Amino acid sequence: MRQTKDDAELDDFGRFSEPALLILVSLAEEPRHGYSMTEDIEAIAGVRLGPGTLYGALARLEARGLIEPLKSEDRRNPYRLTTLGERALRARLDSMMAVARTGQRRLASA
Amino acid sequence: MTWLLRLYPARWRARYGEEFSAVLASQRASVGLVLDVLGGAIDAHLYPQIQHSHSKPIQEKEEDTMTLLMLQRCSAGGPKLSRRDQRIASLFMIFSALVMAGLYIGLTKIYHSAPAVQALFYASVPALALIYGETAYLRKRPWLTQAFILGGGLLGLYLFMLAVCVIGSRL
């Protein structure tokens, strides 16, 4: 997949790449806390992230400034996308769509 | 199940502990869940993300887990590893894996499935974890100390597996 500078923000996540992308997609709609994210991700992608995977990816996203925590009254801390996170998600989705379009075109002409 | 949280570094727990517990409590207990949390705990120890966080720094708690105490006891520079330490330990672990694989293949050709060979096979995975940990955390200690602790650990592990294989072959 061809990468842009923004897209490269999601590099170096190792096994947390896919969970991180799913978290960004989930937060693109509205700020959510961990439990709400796992429910939303299960609904949109059909995978239920375990807490170890979820927080491994969340910690990486937060450390790179792609998401940020919001203040909360209870113990469930919500997170939201930062501007950097939004750019990174947009860039990654654009490159994925470009690959998907090419694949569809080639299948159609095969 | 929330006892699994104790496996995470204190700093990590201070930052994510409460919300992590809430998510953990919402999931049904299963082997997969335990493995997921264990994997997350190992990751949090090996690649702590907290110190690079863009959010406000978390006040470090003077709380010790058994894991932290063990690491602090045998480490010169504390439980936090630099990227360089991690890289060196990883390279050493990969090299050891290749040596063990070669040794295992060679011994299998000569002795087939003798208990001593089987023990080498079973001991190899925990041995690699031991090699990584000891190489990373003891790097600043004198080489004699490193050799003694690592050699002793590997020997103990091998002897244990050998005993298990010998007993298993006689049952």
Image: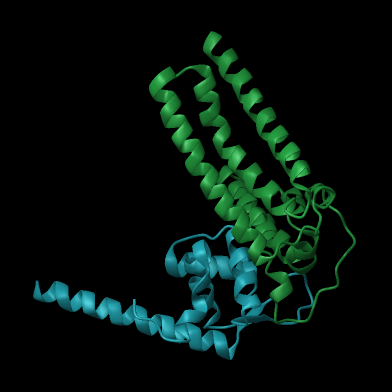
Chain colours: A cyan, B green
Residue B144 picture location, percent across and down: 76, 42
Taking depth in this image into account, of A76 and B157 the one nearest to the observer is B157
Residue drawn at x 75%, y 64% as measured from the top left: B12
- Residue B27 appears in the picture as rendered: no
| Tally of numbered tags | 0
Residue drawn at x 54%, y 73% as measured from the top left: A23
Residue A65 picture location, percent across and down: 63, 82
Taking depth in this image into account, of A65 and B133 the one nearest to the observer is B133
Q: Is residue A86 above or below residue B165?
A: below
Residue drawn at x 61%, y 57% as measured from the top left: B88
Q: Is residue B116 above or below residue B28?
A: above
- Residue A14 appears in the picture as rendered: yes
Taking depth in this image into account, of B37 and B2 the one nearest to the observer is B37
Residue drawn at x 78%, y 81% as measured from the top left: B56
Residue B11 picture location, percent across and down: 79, 64
Identify the residue at the far top of this view. B170
The image quadrant where one finds the C terminus of chain B is top right
Q: In the picture provided, is B79 more to the left or to the right than A66?
A: right
Q: Is residue B94 above or below residue B111?
A: below
Identify the residue at the far bottom of this view. A83
Q: In the picture provided, is B57 more to the left or to the right than B121?
A: right
Q: In the picture provided, is A91 more to the left or to the right than A79?
A: left
Taking depth in this image into account, of B171 and B143 the one nearest to the observer is B143
